[in-house]
Amino acid sequence: MTTKVSLDKSKIKFVLLEGVHKNAIEVLNAAGYTNIEYHKKALEPEELKEVIKDAHFLGIRSRTHLTADVLECANKLIAVGCFCIGTNQVDLEVAKMRGIPVFNAPFSNTRSVAELVLGEILLLMRNVPQANAEVHRGLWNKSASGSNEVRGKKLGIVGYGHIGSQLSIIAESLGMNVYFYDVETKLPLGNAQQVGSLKELLASCDVISLHVPENASTKNLMNAERIAQLKEGSILINAARGTVVDIDALAQALKAGKLRGAALDVFPVEPASINEEFVSPLRGLDNVILTPHIGGSTAEAQENIGTEVASKFVKYSDNGSTLSAVNFPEVSLPEHSGTKRLLHIHENRPGVLNQINQIFVGANINIAAQYLQTDPKIGYVVIDVETDDCSELLQQLREIDGTIRARVLY
């Protein structure tokens, strides 16, 4: 599971799949990494297993699934980069126990998603989706009934994170009154106000926009009971995760006239490709905007994502930094001149750090700097030592019981 000592940058192989933005290549090249294999599409599992065998860094988007079976073939893999927000396409625990940090881009498409949601709010408040559908069918229904400005209307945001708070700011600039619910106490931006319960938010707002992560607590968060709590004639928007909304319950509420309309960019089950039909009970409803998971699909967002994830690759490869890794202890240590840097990833058990330090004591080598971080399962330590030769030290580190991966960085 270990890699060669201090590989030359030209020998460190990056495999980028699914047409990630070419800006990622520019970032890697600028840092001295030129061994890059680029694929415009996702690979089939067997082809992926073959490609991943000699990859040190792997960049993917949402269609590539890194299962335990696939990762078993990745004996040289040092890190994975998800050029998107979500990481549920990767078996994070298996990657962790193989000493592979997984990075993503949680901030880069924030503006793009928020703008899409704002556009949907404006369209649905004016009944544009329904008017558009009717005109396409030849019906000229020129009516102001049920059409409103957003100024002075209440926007309720569920999940006041990066996207939710960005939406809050731009919606307020149009004159909306913003309220939000979050499981944590958050500092409101602008004039937004946090409310004490989700029920209160749902019952009082003209528009509800969901911006929560995918986990056990948010699965079917908007079920039939919650949807019934929505204000009569309100709008529901989901640009978060497909599992957050009970689609059948939403369809029933829309058909019953409970809601003015809805907009969804994510779904519990999504087609794997353009060749697979999208099936949903929401199809055919004039007052529903359905988009194929394109919230972050703008040129600007993809360029930002390319820069963000590629930069994290460079930092990990150059100095061992795992800051913002989603499945790994976060470690960052400044460079120290005149030292060698070693990385040691191990099972989190008592005595490992002591064994590591005893190796250097026994060799009479001074540790110039050391940084250890752990989570319940693994520990990751970066060590700068004052010596010219680390080959024997590295071998001893690898022999420590519980070692997952050890390597010399420089």
Image: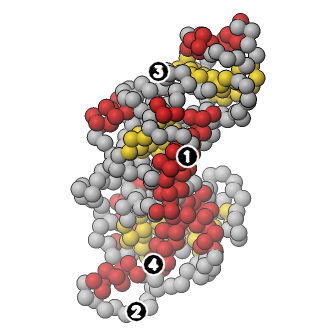
Residue at image mark 2: 143
* Residue at (51, 45) in percent of width and height: 29
Rounded to the nearest angstrom, the CA distance separating label 1 from label 2 is 57 Å
| Percent of width and height locating residue 56 | 46, 32
Q: Is residue 12 left or right of residue 368?
A: left
In the image, which is nearer the foreground, mark 3 or mark 1? 1
Q: 391 above or below 28?
A: above
- CA gap between label 3 and label 2 equals 68 Å
Which mark is in front, 3 or 4? 3
Whether the residues at callouts 3 and 4 have beta carbons within 8 Å, the answer is no
Q: Are marks 4 and 2 in contact (CB under 8 Å)?
A: no
Q: Mark 3 sits on what residue?
A: 1
Task: Check disc 4 and report the residue beneath it.
Answer: 123
Question: Which residue matches tag 1?
Answer: 30
- Give the residue type at disc 4: Leu
Of labels 3 and 2, earlier in sequence is 3
Percent across and percent down for residue 341 are: 65, 25
Q: Is residue 284 left or right of residue 370?
A: left
- Do the residues under discs 4 and 1 have CB atoms within 8 angstroms? no
Residue 259 visible from this viewpoint: no
Q: Amino acid at mark 2?
A: Ser
Residue at 74% across, 9% down = 364
Q: Look at the image and tell me whether residue 186 can be seen.
A: yes
Q: Nearer the viewer, residue 360 or 99?
A: 360
